[in-house]
Amino acid sequence: MAKESAAQRVERIKKEKNGLDVLKDIYVYAVLGEEVHPEDIDRFKWYGLYTQNRNLQAEDDPTLYFMLRIKLESGSMNLEQMREVSALSKEYGRGTADFTTRQDIQLHYIQVKDLPEIFRRLNEVGLSTIFAAGDVPRNVTTCAVSGIDHDELYDVRPIVEKVNDYLRGNKNLSNLPRKYKIGISGCHKHCMGHEIQDLSFTAVPCDCSDKVLFDVSVGGGLASNKQIASHIGFVTPSQILPIVKAVSTIYRDHGLRENRRKARLGHLIDEWGIEKFKEEVIARSKVAIKEEKIMEYTPYAKREHFGIHDSKEKAKSYIGCAINGGHIGSQGLEDLANILEKHGATTIKTTTTQNFVVKDVPTKSAEELAQELKTIGVDAFPSPFKARTLSCTGLNFCKFAISETKDKAISLAEHLEKKFPDFNETVSISVNGCPNSCAHPHVVDIGLLGLKLKNKEGITVPGFELILGGNLEGSKSNFGEKVKIKFLPEEAEGILENIIQKYIASGENDLNKFLKERINDEEFVSSLH
């Protein structure tokens, strides 16, 4: 009998037992202490669980540890939830806690025996890990200041809630070909990043009236499905849910399952062609998708909400804050909750750049709260380097990672802040630990992509490859290009310093444009390393 391919194995596993049905097995494993069957380990993803790298694990420690991803719908965490996640992290996760690019939060060092208690306590504060991973609809991304920003084009909170109600634990969508990512936003800065979602809805003003329509884009993605989403037209707010249902079931019924690397929604669209796909969406949804002009969108590096802003809520402000590479930790969550409560705020909303917004600060306390946040490393007025430096899970915990990322992201930001204290232009940076794209290295100004290379002694060690010039900007979007520079982690600070220094010396005023124009300049590239 021929050996199963990776795709055949996963499809068999899902057919034999639905991922959602593994919950009872999790409880059995937890109580009996039996070794987890490898096929159930795959199904654990449906509850946000991934086995983690043994890189930081003692050699004599045989424990099977997991990363646990907790879904934050609309990126929202209140004080009770912050404190509970902080407590769970301290008790079971060795103090780990990181925000993700899908507005979730994840812990490490989780053991199966502790999952029943963790799930119980999360449930008590209204949090869940269901569909945080696996071949399912992932967390719906949206704008962190939806409903409170004076300049927003549309308050999408009721729409997002309806979509979440449809997707949440939906057994009819629990066996998709691969992961499936949706974004919905009414943000005037387009912070949701519609260009790299499988399905997205972005509010745009309508020329024909004072109403708002939503740009529908499909098939975007990174890693094996690295392509900018295709615009297929515009719909009204009430038509978003029917489109979500149509696209979701089309993907379920017709998605390509023969090859895991060719199984995303974008691959189905490539197979069918965009017109056939659009026709099927219209047929299933019964929605007449409108044709309008292509819109202009905010450049990626300027999609942010930092600083103190007046809210739509009376006598309230919101504060956009930056942390380093998404790392908050148990103590950071506890300190954050205490500071917010002290100043009368109750909720944060995480962002797709691993940062967060304090949603509901009494205006009279906003300045004082922002100052106190600095004492725990949270900055409402961050440097350009801290503001948009992303990092994936990295070598310490991820089985696929080649290079360490979290500490490197912090080190890079701090180094550049010291070298260029007066630099005030937007810059986006990504530190990604492997050839996949969890930290979006292909859509930032400067991307570091983890790989293996040989050092001066000829020994194979972790390193990075440099990617320059990526940007998301609607139809003007482009992926960054590798520039054939491979380097050791300890060389990263010097290389990024060289890039910024050469840009400043050029006298130009657009870093992304500067980098794109020099990607193929061998003299410039060789001078960086």
Image (cartoon, rainbow, N blue to C red):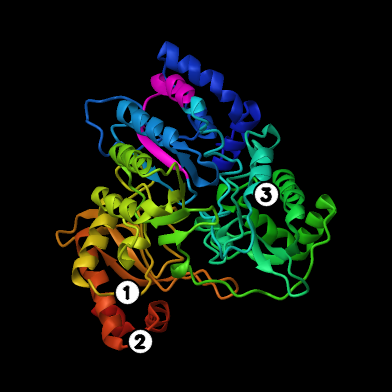
Q: Residue sitting at 30 percent across and 65 percent down?
A: 383
Relative to 202, is 122 on the left or the right? left
Q: Quadrant of residue 450?
A: bottom left
Relative to 280, is 514 on the left or the right? left
State how far apart marks 3 and 1 are (Cα).
36 Å
Q: Which residues are magenta?
A: 104-121
Residue at which label 1 appears: 424
Query: Which marked residue is nearer to the observer: mark 2 or mark 3?
Result: 3
Q: Is residue 209 above or below residue 250?
A: below
Query: At label 1, which amino acid type do we have?
Result: Asn
Quarter of the figure with the C terminus: bottom left
Q: Is residue 528 visible?
A: no
Extreme residue in the left direction: 457
Q: Are marks 2 and 1 in contact (CB under 8 Å)?
A: no
Q: Foreground residue, 241 or 212?
A: 212
Badge 1, how many Cα within 10 Å: few under 14, some, many 20+?
A: few
The secondary structure type at the circle numbered 2 is loop
Query: At label 3, which amino acid type do we have?
Result: Ile
Point out residue 303 in the picture as x, y percentages from the top left corner.
48, 65
Please tell me which of labels 2 and 1 falls first in the chain.
Answer: 1
Quarter of the figure with the N terminus: top right
* 302 within the magenta span: no
Residue at which label 3 appears: 159
Q: Residue sitting at 63 percent across and 55 percent down?
A: 155
Residue at which label 2 appears: 508
Q: Residue sitting at 70 percent across and 43 percent down?
A: 252
The secondary structure type at the circle numbered 3 is helix
State how far apart marks 2 and 3 are (Cα).
42 Å
Badge 3, how many Cα within 10 Å: few under 14, some, many 20+?
A: some
